Amino acid sequence: MPEYNGWTNYETWNVALWIQNDEGLYSISQDYDTYPEFVACMRELESTETPDGVAWNDSGIDVDELNEMLKENREV
């Protein structure tokens, strides 16, 4: 499977980029153990996509990869 900057694909990379590099999104992500929980929070906040236009629930996103990222972020 092709990779994008070390991530599964562009969509996964873009979501990870925003969560890891935007202070507000990073702070929000610290409250959740899984990416679907984070997406539910974003929906409650009426945010449907990254600032680059990738939907938080895009079908191409590798949820397992983002779950691992969230776990690693919490361990820091």
Image (cartoon, helix red, strand yellow):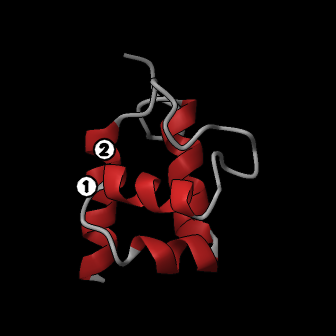
Mark 2 surroundings: few (<14), some (14-19) or many (≥20) residues within 10 A: some
| Disc 1 secondary structure class | helix
Give the residue type at disc 2: Glu
- Looking at the image, residue 13 lies above or below residue 2: below
Tag 1 residue: 68
In x, y percent, where is residue 14?
A: 60, 45
Quarter of the rendering containing residue 56? top right
Q: Is residue 16 above or below residue 27?
A: above
Q: Position of residue 30 (x, y in %)?
A: 37, 77
Q: Quadrant of residue 70?
A: bottom left
Between 42 and 71, the residue placed more toward the observer is: 42
Q: Are marks 1 and 2 in contact (CB under 8 Å)?
A: yes
Residue beneath label 2, please? 65
Q: CA distance from mark 1 to mark 2?
A: 5 Å
User: In the rendered view, does 46 fall on the left or right side of 11?
Assistant: right
**In terms of secondary structure, where does tag 2 sit?**
helix
